[in-house]
Image (cartoon, rainbow, N blue to C red):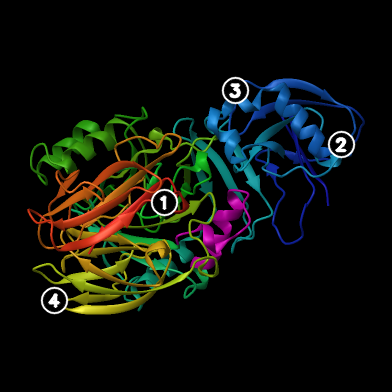
Amino acid sequence: MLLVVLFGLQVFTFVPAEPDVPQGQCLADGECTAITGGAKSVVVFNNGLHEGGVSVELQPTGDIQALADDLAEKINAEATLLPHQKDYGFGKPYSLYTGNGTNVTSWEQILDDSRLYVVPNGLLFMWPTIEIGHAVELHDIETPNGKPVIVRTLKHSPMVFELENLLTEEEAEAVRVAAMEVKHEGNKFQRSTTGHTGNVDPYRTSDNAFVHSESEVAMNLTKRAFHSLRMKYDMALGDGIQVLRYNASGGYRWHTDWFPEKLVYGRNHDVTRGGSNRFATVFFYLSDVEWGGQTGFPEAEGDTSELNASLAKAETMFRANSWEMQAVEKCFGKFSVKPKKARAILFYSLKPNGKGDPMSMHTGCPVLEGQKWAANLWIWNKDRESRPKEKKPISVTFTNRMKEKCLVSWVTNPRHVQGSLEPGQSMRMSTYDTDAFVFRDVNRVRVLARWTANIALGETQVVHITYGMDDLQEEDWGVGDPTDGELHLKIFNQRSYDVDVYWAGDLKTPVMELKPSHSGVIKTWDGHGFKVFKKGETKAMIKRYVATSKNGKKQKFFVD
């Protein structure tokens, strides 16, 4: 079936590319009519942009790939990428998308007087904002009431859209009920946590639960959200639907959903260097809220008509200069989206070239009256986890050398506690190379230690958990990258006492002194050896290490 839509001077079409991927739509207020012809005039844009288009007359062709690469050259698509991105496979081969988000695979999908978007290899199509209020109807997405999902532009920067008809009021209620019934220890309703470490955060005063395959409604909403972004549904790219409950005064301080663009807990979050990060957020409002509870974007200008009254109300609820007072000022003094039951919005966390977008910073505005129920779905640009079959197994024994009980969790699901360790107690676990762990206090307020598995240290390992232990879970060692022939060795002292590190051939003066749970970096070369002794002693060697280029330019050595 061919759908063709006229909207002003622009024409969009859809031909289903794959029977298992829902596609096709009409622009809002348009009529579907058939268009035929030979040469076609189009305006070509870079991915996600609504300005800087280039008018081109196309001649019929069956080589869509060559056409895409040619149009990319005409609009200088490579200039939208960072200089290093080409080294990571970004750029050619380019893809072409129509204004409805359809990946062009045939000449027939291109219509005269239409818009085309060039997407570099390694990146995802992003809806262009066009103009405030611009709307696109997605008739291919099944909804319970048969109404089309409508993508309507709310803001240019950050790129925010309303997804009308994405869910019904009945579905909103069903998701809320499903969240209350979750039994899984790590996913059930409890105080909200933040980030990789799963800590309770005083700046996030809500309760939440993660709803997955146990709820058919949640699964349907997840699939609809993916298709609204013109993506194939892939469970590996979603964090699951997180259901949130904010009581009066509850909120969440301003933050971004994308993670710092570096190596964190063994994960590369720099999309421009082949990593993975949160690409977009779909936010569902599951209830009305009497006052407050918006999703605020403090970097963007917006309506301020309710600012004074809201600040006066907030003064009766929060102390002066608190983060809640600041959040109220940001929410009612800048751009925000008000909650309404069964409303849904989409905002992109990344820029079209894959860089994190600072403008996407947002806040869960404090609830001034009533109660707020909502849910969010974080969608990633690519699978953030290596498959276990690609990792080598490691058997690890953790021993708690701290003076307090600690909780043991994988970073992949910090809310789910794998076990707890009293001081001096040990536990054995099976894990995989590069898996990261976090050790927290029993109240989940403090991160006590971190550890990342490394197969280079053996298939069976013993780890003594000490305060502040943090082994290479950050990419930046503070000494720059190794030069040609140079090796960087990071040494971690996991002993309970101070140690001295010497060159193997010179025991007169230590090259490094380390206190317990501390680390340091030495610049060295292939074949250089080191000996470690208890501080002030040079008779009984504790450990020895020989740097070798076979282990890479950046190596770690544990004194345990």
Residue 233 placement (x, y as % from top left): 60, 59
Secondary structure of the residue carrying tag 1 is loop
Q: Which residues are magenta?
A: 218-239
Which residue in the rendered view is the most extreme toward the front?
Answer: 505
Between discs 3 and 1, the one toward the N terminus: 3
Say whether residue 364 is left or right of residue 482: left
**Of the residues under marks 2 and 1, which one precedes in the sequence?**
2
Find out whether residue 512 is within the magenta segment.
Answer: no
Considering the numbered disc 2 on the image, is that residue within a helix, a strand or a loop?
loop
Q: Main secondary structure of the magenta part?
A: helix
Q: Which mark is residue 35?
A: 2
Under mark 3, the amino acid is Glu
Q: Nearer the viewer, mark 3 or mark 2?
A: 3
Residue that carries the numbered disc 1 in the rendered image: 548
Label 3 with label 1: CB-CB less than 8 Å: no
The Cα–Cα distance between marks 3 and 2, rounded to whole angstroms, is 26 Å
Picture coordinates of residue 343, whole percent (x, y): 45, 51
As drawn, the residue found furthest toward the right would be 38
The residue carrying mark 4 is 424
Separation of disc 2 and disc 4 at Cα? 76 Å
The residue located at (50%, 51%) in the rendering is: 380
Residue 377 visible within the image: yes
